[in-house]
Image (cartoon, coloured by chain):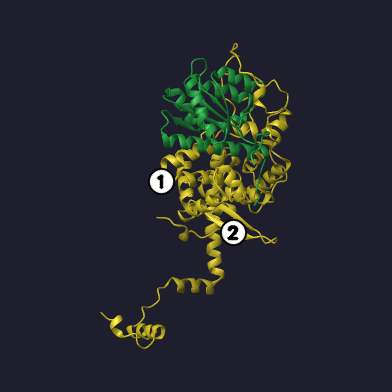
């Protein structure tokens, strides 16, 4: 149903400059049947999006060393406006500016640490966003 | 406690706006992720929802993106939610009983059954709360403004447009395979200069105004003028910027032509209701999408109440019958109860069973 490649599974990009955290999040999402790629550099992720790579959902840590999540989102939006519907932020602590920006843009955000309930919700919502992305890009419309 | 038994099922002729109000629908579509988080985090009913029904709710709700009702197959829902088809049926029952969704079944000519899912009262209430708490944050003028054009800091190297413009899958739109294994993990390189302004809003970037939208806009503008000056003929030509403004609102609705026209009429009616200084201006009605949707909602409510009143006036017999139905039946007399019990259980059913 959501076949976007031969494996038929949506693709999620996880961006976190702390490698173990990125891998942990990736494992969590993989267990729910999603394909996951990790990137430990927001600049690297930006480069890939700039070169035309597209993902069903992007899960991004806000607080990062080189370029924070908000900066990544702002730059990536220029190349890929559709990212707005595919973005999920996670973070342990949000600077006030980032918080304001995320609220203003109405972007989904999960606060770390992720307890069991939050992890389940994160996976469910990432899956939902992936389906929505697939339907949207197909232009699927059940006209009533 | 809301239960499905109290929720009338939406009929096939019920307008979309009654099943799922336009404002909530568009807001839910545009901020899907945040809306789901807020529903789950704020609404007590959603908090209590178990993992399975919650996954199914998400799988159903993605299909409401542009429509009031969705009819994904149970197999599709099973694939999306990760549960079996049997579990999907059970969980759909749970969602329906608890008022999260409304389910309508329709028999098709082929004999198969199609199931329509619409949001239930619990969901509608939670979404209305979400819209109140998160009013459309980017309610900027829809009028194209060349002064705010932002040069992308990092233009895509691919010359192909984004998939959003073509409504085709990204791999088709860009003519690229999406095999991410081909992409090597990148190394850092010098950053391009940071854009000084935020990315342009989605409305400014992605709304595509069709010829049909412009025609609808002209008709809506004519109707506004007729309403403003009932005795004068409506003008045939309108200011291009006004047409563009109205057409942008029409394009944002993503509905059929008829539904768009109805929404624009509702918006005109709703704006006339609240306008204090005479007839509302074009900008008052259509300049901001959020305000436009408010006008639509206000006008829609007024139209429905007028229609309801007209129906009651036109069908006095039906009205009398419904009033009679609402009147409680008189309590049966003890003799009648006794006679009925004897009829049911025979003459040996003694009165001692009935009387204390």
Q: Which residue is mark 2?
A: B105
The relative height of residue A26 versus residue B94 in the rendered view (above or below) is above
The relative height of residue A107 versus residue B249 in the rendered view (above or below) is above
Q: Residues within 10 Å of mark 1 (few under 14, many from 20)?
A: few
The relative height of residue B104 versus residue B349 in the rendered view (above or below) is above
Measured in 3D between alpha carbons, the distance from the residue under mark 1 to the one under mark 2, in whole angstroms, is 27 Å
Count of marks overlaid on the render: 2
Circle 1 — which element?
helix
Q: Quadrant of residue B334?
A: bottom left
Q: Quadrant of residue A113?
A: top left
Chain letter of the residue carrying label 1: B
- Chain B, colour shown: yellow
Task: Answer left or right for B159 relative to B115.
Answer: right
Q: Which residue is mark 1?
A: B48
Q: Residue sitting at 34 percent across and 86 percent down?
A: B335
Chain letter of the residue carrying label 2: B
Q: Which x, y percent locates residue B280?
A: 56, 44
Q: Is residue B127 visible?
A: no
Q: Are the residues under badges 1 and 2 in a single subunit?
A: yes
Q: Residues within 10 Å of mark 2 (few under 14, many from 20)?
A: some
- Chain A, colour shown: green
Q: Earlier in the sequence, mark 1 or mark 2?
A: 1
Q: Which x, y percent locates residue A47?
A: 62, 18
In-front residue for pair B100/B136? B100
């Amino acid at each position: 149903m959501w076949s976007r490649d031969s494996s038929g599974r949506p693709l999620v990009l996880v961006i976190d400059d702390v490698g173990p955290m990125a891998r942990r999040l990736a494992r969590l999402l993989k267990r729910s049947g999603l394909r996951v790629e990790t990137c430990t550099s927001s600049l690297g992720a930006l480069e890939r999006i700039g070169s035309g790579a597209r993902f069903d959902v992007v899960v991004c840590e806000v607080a990062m060393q080189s370029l924070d999540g908000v900066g990544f989102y702002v730059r990536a939006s220029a190349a890929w406006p559709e990212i707005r519907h595919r973005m999920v932020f996670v973070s342990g602590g949000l600077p006030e500016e980032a918080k304001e920006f995320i609220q203003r843009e109405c972007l989904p955000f999960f606060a770390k640490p992720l307890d069991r309930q939050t992890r389940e919700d994160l996976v469910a919502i990432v899956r939902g966003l992936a389906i929505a992305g697939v339907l949207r890009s197909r232009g699927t419309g059940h006209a009533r | 406690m809301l239960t499905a038994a109290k929720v009338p099922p939406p009929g096939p002729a019920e307008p979309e706006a009654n099943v799922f109000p336009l404002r909530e629908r568009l807001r839910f579509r545009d901020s899907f992720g945040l809306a789901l988080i807020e529903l789950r985090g704020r609404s007590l009913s959603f908090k209590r929802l178990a993992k399975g029904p919650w996954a199914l709710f998400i799988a159903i709700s993605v299909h409401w993106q542009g429509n009031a009702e969705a009819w994904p197959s149970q197999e599709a829902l099973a694939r999306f939610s990760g549960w079996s088809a049997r579990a999907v049926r059970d969980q759909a029952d749970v969602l329906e009983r608890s008022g999260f969704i409304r389910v309508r079944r329709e028999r098709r000519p082929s004999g198969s059954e199609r199931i329509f899912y619409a949001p239930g009262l619990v969901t509608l209430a939670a979404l209305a709360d979400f819209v109140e708490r998160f009013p459309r944050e980017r309610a900027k003028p829809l009028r194209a403004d060349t002064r705010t054009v932002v040069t992308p800091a990092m233009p895509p190297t691919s010359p192909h447009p984004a998939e959003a413009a073509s409504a085709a899958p990204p791999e088709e739109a860009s003519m690229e395979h999406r095999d991410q294994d081909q992409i090597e993990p990148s190394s850092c390189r010098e950053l391009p200069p940071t854009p000084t302004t935020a990315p342009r809003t989605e409305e400014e970037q992605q709304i595509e105004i069709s010829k049909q939208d412009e025609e609808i806009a002209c008709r809506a503008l004519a109707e506004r003028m007729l309403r403003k000056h009932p005795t004068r003929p409506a003008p045939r030509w309108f200011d291009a910027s006004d047409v563009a403004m109205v057409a942008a609102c029409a394009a944002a609705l993503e509905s059929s032509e008829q539904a768009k026209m109805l929404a624009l009429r509702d918006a005109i009616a709703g704006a006339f209701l609240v306008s204090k200084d005479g007839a509302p201006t074009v900008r008052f009605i259509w300049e901001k999408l959020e305000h436009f949707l408010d006008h639509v909602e206000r006008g829609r409510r007024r139209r429905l109440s007028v229609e309801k009143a007209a129906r009651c006036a036109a069908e006095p017999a039906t009205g009398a019958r419904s009033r009679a139905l609402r009147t409680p039946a008189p309590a049966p007399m003890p003799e009648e109860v006794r006679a009925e019990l004897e009829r049911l259980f025979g003459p040996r059913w003694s009165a001692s069973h009935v009387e204390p």
